[in-house]
Every structure is written in structure tokens, then in C-alpha cells.
Image: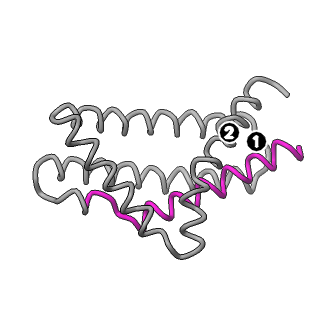
Amino acid sequence: MNGLTAALGLIAGTLIFLYSFYFIRIIKGEPEGFELELLQALADWMIQKGASSRGQLWLMLLLAFLLELLYFLLVFSVVKNLFLLMFTGFFIAVESYHLISFGYSLGRFFRGDIKLKHLFNWRWERFSAILFFTHSLLVLIHIIVY
């Protein structure tokens, strides 16, 4: 196993672990409680951080973009399965829309156009979580089998 494959496996395994909590709630049909907890934690954090939360949220969005970019570049560098590469292309399109949409909502929130409870489009968040979990699982299976 080379370094790129190990890095991809580590990132994919981490994504599966992190998204598994949300994924399980989505599959059970009970994501709202988890989403409410996340929203409350965000609100508490923003109150604690004050005005600096604005810059930190934009930085988190940038870091999310960079981490996703790294993940997708590693997938294209390591994976040779055509189906998985096509699925990755679809996933990149979905995540591009997701990040741009969230950035737009974040801007609207900081301008005062929307309330915090409307910052997230939970249907897209759920769809993204399902895709991240599924894609990461398929990537790990590909690494193990091939």
C-alpha cells in the first residue's frame, strides 16, 4: 500500500466514523433531534465567540472545501474503478452546489436576511451526509479489495 492509498483510507475511515452518527439517525427516520442539537451547539458557540465567530465560520467553510478537495483528488489518484470515479464526479457536483449554497446562506445570515434556524438546508445536509458515508464506505471497500 502506497502513501496516497493510506492517506485516502485514513480520510475515508474518518469520514465514515464522523458521518455514521448522523447517517444512523437519518436511516432511522429521526434526524431532527440531531440537527437541533447541532444548531443549538452552533448558537451557543457563536454566543461564546461573539463577533469572531463570523470569520471562524468562513474559515471553517474554506477548510471544509480544502479537505473535500484533498479527498476527491486522492480518490482520483488512487481509485481505478470506473463506476466509483463516475460516482465521485456526481458527488463533486453535489458537494460543489452544497458548499456554494451554504456559503450563500452564511452570507445572508450575517447580513441579517435569515435567522440561524434557516442557515442550513437540512434536506441537502442529509443528502450530503448519506453520500459522504456511502462514498467513503465504497472507497474503503475498493482499497481493501483491490
Q: Residue 26: x percent and y percent? A: 54, 69
The color scheme shown is: one colour
Task: Say whether residue 72 is magenta.
Answer: no
x and y, in percent, of residue 131 in the image: 58, 59
Give the residue number, with chain letter if any, for mark 1. Answer: 79
Magenta stretch: residue 131 in it?
A: yes
Horizontal side of 56 relative to 7 (left or right) equals left
- 3D distance between C-alphas at marks 2 and 1: 6 Å
In the shown orientation, is residue 110 left or right of residue 122? left
Q: Residue at label 2?
A: 76
What is the quadrant of residue 114 in the picture? Answer: bottom left
Q: Is residue 34 left or right of residue 110?
A: right
Q: Amino acid at mark 2?
A: Phe
Q: Seen from this angle, which residue lies furthest right?
A: 145
Amino acid type shown at disc 1: Val
Provide residue 85's location: percent of width, then percent of height.
69, 50
